[in-house]
């Protein structure tokens, strides 16, 4: 069998398997998006495969939002009464946009990478999602940290929900810049969803945000933990602890 695989590998161009994988991902994504748009509420059920199919179909698994974080963010969007700020675009932008459109909410998504912004824009156009303002926002040096340069003049005065999966982890100061740059625009009761809770940098940022906002910090998820920060306690119990995360952090 190994000899057959070796022969097949030698005679079949690598571009063909890549094409087949890409075609399958596109098929799975289109099918899952059709179901998600038809009934986004049922799609968030643990019994549904829609969210995992969306993550698989989107590709980019090393960087894309996990099923747990994506589902958690979408549940917050369902409860949100006001504008939504997203830091870093991707699959969340598309799916959040679908629900926001139904709820009459507006999403402002900051993205510093122009090629990636172009990709997300194509999906928004393909699915005719008009609730999202996808904004090219280069990273700016603010002294002790770097963060996006948001076009504040064309953004709302208040945001009720922040979905934070950017800027990239190697940015100086990480994602902390959200608070000093946008604090005055966070509405009372604003919820911040912060991904990558296993990383020590995110743990420190989440604790700092919670202290500076005098807010509650909750740890969510089991396989791919994330933080929910705000002054409204939720009914969903924490699934792990900061001590456990710290032991496993890389």
Image: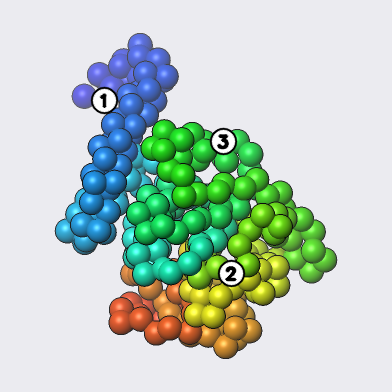
Q: Earlier in the sequence, mark 2 or mark 3?
A: 3
Question: Label 3 belongs to which residue?
Answer: 118
Within 10 angstroms of label 3, few (less than 14), some, or many (20 or more) residues? few
Q: Residue at x 56, y 55 (%)?
A: 108
- Residue 196 picture location, percent across and down: 49, 64
Mark closer to the observer (2, 3): 2
Q: Secondary structure at mark 2?
A: loop
Question: Label 1 belongs to which residue?
Answer: 2
Q: Earlier in the sequence, mark 1 or mark 3?
A: 1
Q: Residue at x 24, y 46 (%)?
A: 38
For this orientation, the residue located farthest to the front is 104
Question: Label 2 belongs to which residue?
Answer: 158
Tell me how far mark 2 sits from mark 3, CA to CA.
27 Å
For this orientation, the residue located farthest to the right is 143
Are the two marked residues, 1 and 3, in contact with CB atoms closer than 8 angstroms? no
Q: Residue at x 41, y 68 (%)?
A: 80
């Amino acid at each position: 069998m190994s000899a057959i695989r070796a022969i097949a590998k030698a005679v079949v161009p690598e571009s063909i398997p890549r094409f087949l994988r890409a075609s399958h991902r596109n098929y799975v994504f289109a099918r899952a998006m059709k179901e998600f748009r038809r009934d986004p509420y049922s799609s968030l059920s643990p019994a549904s495969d829609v969210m995992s199919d969306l993550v698989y179909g989107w590709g980019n698994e090393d960087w894309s939002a996990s099923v747990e974080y994506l589902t958690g963010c979408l549940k917050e969007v369902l409860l949100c009464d006001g504008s939504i700020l997203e830091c870093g675009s991707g699959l969340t932008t598309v799916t959040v946009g679908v629900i926001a459109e139904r709820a009459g909410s507006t999403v402002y998504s900051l993205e510093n990478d122009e090629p990636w912004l172009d990709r997300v824009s194509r999906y928004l156009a393909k699915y005719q999602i008009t609730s999202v303002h996808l904004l090219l926002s280069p990273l700016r040096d603010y002294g002790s940290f770097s963060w996006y340069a948001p076009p504040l003049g064309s953004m709302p005065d208040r945001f009720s929900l922040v979905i934070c999966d950017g800027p990239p982890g190697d940015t100086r100061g990480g994602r902390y810049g959200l608070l000093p740059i946008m604090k005055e625009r966070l509405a009372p009761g604003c919820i911040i969803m912060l991904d990558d809770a296993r990383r020590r940098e995110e743990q420190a940022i989440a604790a700092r945000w919670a202290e500076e906002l005098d807010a509650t910090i909750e740890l969510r998820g089991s396989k791919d933990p994330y933080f929910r920060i705000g002054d409204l306690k939720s009914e969903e119990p924490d699934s792990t602890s900061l001590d456990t995360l710290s032991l496993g952090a890389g």
